[in-house]
Amino acid sequence: MGFGIIEIINNQPKYILMEAKHLNKNRTEGLEKLGLIYHETINIIQQYSITDVAIEAPFYGKNIQSMLKLGRAQGIAIAAAIHQKISVHEYAPRKIKQSITGRGSSSKEQVSSMLQRILCFTHNEKHFDATDALAVALCHFFQQNNSANKPTKKSNNSWSSFIKQNPDRLNP
């Protein structure tokens, strides 16, 4: 289970931490792992005073069993966040890559490299659960920042509002 934490200071993302929690296959059974994920998620939320959780949306894979296990793990992490009254946001893998590198088909290595440039940190580990999680966090920041800066559209639902807004376009 990977997680990444950023802090927003003066509307700029700042790297705090990224980590991968490895759940030992030999020591822990399937349902017990879900309990560990739930408690670990709550611990991270409380320890770092998390205000938003962003998660990678489930994606279609060739191995159905792996997809089911991943979906359960994601659901448990979402439930933990909801239990802590934290808002949860999901992003598709292509959206995350597009947000970080500009290309939705970027490799994990390219995403990791771009994260290091954007957030000014170094990371040499080849295990990508942590960098994937950090990419989701940064994607969430970019998406929230973009939607906050977009101008709101004026509603032109009726002819009367059109006429009021465009009196010079009337032809008497």
Image (tube, helix red, strand yellow):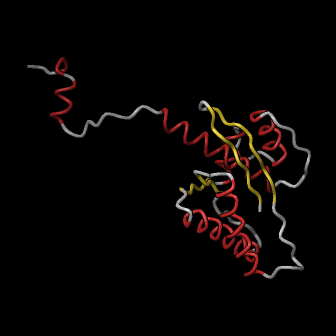
Viewer-side residue, 63 vs 144: 144
Tell me which corner region of the image, top left, top right, bottom left or bottom right, holds residue 25.
bottom right
Q: Quadrant of the C terminus?
A: top left
Residue found at x 72% / y 47%: 135
Considering every residue shown, the one lying at the far top of the view is: 168
Q: Is residue 137 above or below residue 34?
A: above
**Residue under the point 67% across and 73% down:** 72
In the displayed structure image, the side of residue 81 where residue 73 appears, left or right:
right
Residue 133: image location, x then y, percent? 73, 53
Which residue is at a point 87% across and 38% down the rendered structure image?
Answer: 122
How far across and down, in percent of the image, does residue 66 sit? 76, 73
Along the viewing direction, whichever of 90 and 82 lies nearer the viewer: 82
Q: Residue furthest left?
A: 172
**Which residue is at a point 80% across and 57% down the rendered structure image?**
129
The quadrant where residue 169 appears: top left
Label total for image: 0
Image position, residue 65 (x, y; %): 75, 77
Q: In which quarter of the image is residue 168?
A: top left
Q: Is residue 74 left or right of residue 111?
A: left
Q: Is residue 153 above or below residue 136?
A: above
Q: Which of 152 and 119 is in front in this view?
A: 119
Screen quadrant of the N terminus = bottom right
Residue 106 rendering spot, x and y as whole percentages = 77, 45
